[in-house]
Amino acid sequence: MNRYYANLGDVWKHLVLAELLALEPPKNYWETHAGSASYPLTHSPDRDYGVYRFLEHGDSVPELAESHYAAELRRLSGDGEALANYPGSALLTMHMLGKGAEYLLCDLDPESTASLRAAAAKLGLGEQERVRDADGMTTVLEEARRFEGDPGEVVVTIDPFEPFVVAGGASALEVAASLISGGFKVVYWYGYDAPEQRAYPIGMLREYARAAGSTVWCGDLMLTATAGQSEREVEALLAGTDGPGAGCGVICANFLPASNERCAALGEGLAKAWRDATLPNGSPGSLEFLAIGS
Ligand SMILES: C[S@@+](CC[C@H](N)C(=O)[O-])C[C@H]1O[C@@H](n2cnc3c(N)ncnc32)[C@H](O)[C@@H]1O
């Protein structure tokens, strides 16, 4: 089950994902940790700091107002109504790509997979989807090994709970490294608890990418107030909140430089829209954005 939906981490991940899908629509979309199709959208401190802030302040920043994510949220809420259900990454993707793509969606939670099948059927995508009640890392690696098409026509989202845990043969980071080396387009999400861990996956993933002639880009959003603080100090700063940690980011591999630049503009825009934000516990919630190219 996913209790973090519609928080800041989701907003950043989905903002980037929607943009990349629109700019470089793939023929195949695979996801290791797909979650549920959608989640009832109600206020919580975490969601107020997440998607509700985007809905209330996004329009004042042109990059965000013109984003494909904003367009999808507007389309899903319909006629200026409040958004009733927040779409997970898989539903967002199925809405955007429709019948133009084939989907492989994995999750270990049977309620989540049932919701994905039902959502796909409702969108008329029953023929296009394969939803697997299975470990996403091994399933996607196996799929990649068997895949005979152009890996540049596959987008894989890896959104791990525990990036270093080896479930069934490979950790999420190892899966990302393997797919990046193989030329697949990857969107890999990470979070971290202390500022010294900022952007930590890029070091390892960049080495794999360089060796294979692949490209990686990292977009990282860190709470400004955590800069220079230890993990313990960050914990004190965030006491009483359910997130977001010191920061989070996405690594995007094998996308075009122009698409990465567009994502960088979205990251700058998000930092602008969060400039005077406060965290659920009243601590300063402004964000600083860092982009690292390959
Ligand atoms: C944060 S949610 C996914 C959210 C979704 N990717 C999104 O962006 O809307 C994480 C999901 O991972 C699932 N999960 C945990 N371990 C898994 C594994 N080894 N393989 C597949 N799914 C897993 C959980 O059941 C949960 O639904």
Image (cartoon, grey):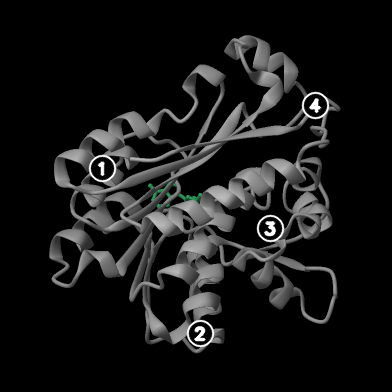
Three-letter amino acid code of the residue under disc 2 = Ala
Three-letter amino acid code of the residue under disc 1 = Ala
Residue 195's image quarter?
A: top right
Does mark 4 have its CB less than 8 Å from ligand 1? no
Q: Mark 1 highlights which residue?
A: 177
Three-letter amino acid code of the residue under disc 3 = Leu
Q: Please tell me whether mark 2 or mark 1 is closer to you in this view.
A: 1
Q: Mark 3 highlights which residue?
A: 64
Location of residue 288 in the rendering, given as x and y in whole percent from the top left corner: 64, 32
Residue 78's image quarter?
A: bottom right
Instruction: Say which of 130 and 156 sits in front.
Output: 156
Q: Please tell me whether mark 3 or mark 1 is closer to you in this view.
A: 3
The residue that appears at 60% across and 44% down in the rendered structure is 9
Q: Secondary structure at mark 1?
A: helix
Q: CA distance from mark 4 to mark 2?
A: 43 Å
Instruction: Say which of 283 and 263 sits in front.
Output: 263
Nearer-N-terminus badge (3/2): 3
Location of residue 137 in the rendering, given as x and y in whole percent from the top left corner: 31, 50
Q: Secondary structure at mark 3?
A: helix
Are there few (<14), some (14-19), or many (20+) residues within 10 Å of tag 3? many
Are there few (<14), some (14-19), or many (20+) residues within 10 Å of tag 2? some
Check the picture and name the quadrant holding the C terminus.
Answer: top left
In the picture, measured across the screen, residue 160 lies left or right of residue 184, that is right
Q: Secondary structure at mark 2?
A: helix
The residue that appears at 62% across and 29% down in the rendered structure is 245
Q: Secondary structure at mark 4?
A: loop
Q: Mark 4 highlights which residue?
A: 284
Q: CA distance from mark 2 to mark 1?
A: 33 Å
Is the residue under label 2 in contact with that under label 4 (CB below 8 Å)? no
Q: Mark 2 highlights which residue?
A: 121
Q: CA distance from mark 4 to mark 3?
A: 22 Å
Nearer-N-terminus badge (3/1): 3
